[in-house]
Amino acid sequence: MTQRTLVLLKPDAVRRGLTGEIISRIERKAGWRITALELRALGQETLEQHYGEHQGKPFYEPLVEFMSSGPVVALIVEGERVIEGLRALAGPTDPIAAAPGSIRGDYGVIVRENLIHASDSEESAEREVKIFFPGRA
Ligand code: RTP
Ligand code: MG
C-alpha cells in the first residue's frame, strides 16, 4: 500500500545537527522517497493548525513555544506503508520509553524535545500535507 506522510524534524534536531542523520535513516528504507523537503520557521497560525488537537492540554503552550524556537525541516515521504513505518522509525512519544535503534530512543530524553513528528494516520497525513505544502495537496 503506497502512502505519503508529513514529517517534521523539530527545532531540537536542527539545532543539534541531527537532520542529516535522521534523513539518511529515512532514505535507507527500501522504496521510500522524499518528495518534498524544506527548512522553515513555523508561525503561530501554522502551529495552531498542526497541533490543534492538543489545544487546551497542559503541554500545548510549551509545545508551541518549543516548535517556534527555531526552524524545522518539513518533508513529504512516500512509499510502502510509510505512515506506520515512520512512526516505528521515530519510536514512542516519550524518548525514554523508545527503544534504542529508533530516532527518539537514540537521541531523545525530554518528552517535548523528541526530534521528529510523523503523521499518525492517512487522514492526518492529508490534512498536514495541506498545511505545510499546499501546492502538493
Ligand atoms: P507528534 O504529533 O509530534 O508526531 O508526536 P506524537 O504523536 O508522538 O505525540 P502527541 O501526543 O501528538 O504530542 C505531540 C507532541 O507534544 C509534545 N508533548 N509533550 N507531556 C508532555 O510534556 C508532552 N506530551 C506531548 C511532544 O513533542 C509530542 O511529540
Ligand atoms: Mg501526534
Image (cartoon, rainbow, N blue to C red):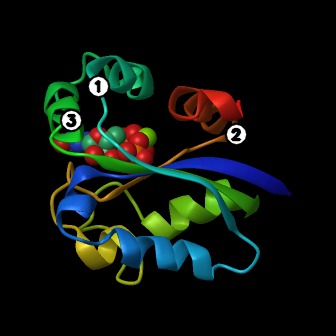
Residue 29 can be seen in this image: yes
Element type at mark 2: helix
Q: Dot 1 surroundings within 10 Å: few (below 14), some, or many (20 or more)? A: few
The alpha-carbon separation of the residues under discs 3 and 2 comes to: 25 Å
Amino acid under disc 3: Ser
Residue at the spot of label 2: 122
Amino acid under disc 1: Gly
The alpha-carbon separation of the residues under discs 1 and 3 comes to: 7 Å
Q: Residue furthest right?
A: 1
Q: Nearer the viewer, residue 124 or 34?
A: 34
Residue at x-position 43% and y-position 20%:
49
- From the top left corner, tell me how far across and down residue 114 is, in percent: 27, 57
Residue at the spot of label 3: 68
Residue at the spot of label 1: 43
- Disc 2 beta carbon < 8 A from ligand 2? no
Amino acid under disc 2: Glu
N-terminal of the two: label 1 or label 3?
1
In the image, is 96 to the left or to the right of 75?
left
Quarter location, residue 85: bottom right
- Above/below status of 33 relative to 102: above
- From the top left corner, tell me how far across and down residue 82 is, in percent: 68, 60
Question: Which of the four quarters of the rendered structure image does ligand 2 lie in?
Answer: top left
Query: On the rendered image, what quadrant is the C terminus found in?
Result: top right
Residue at x-position 55% and y-position 44%:
119
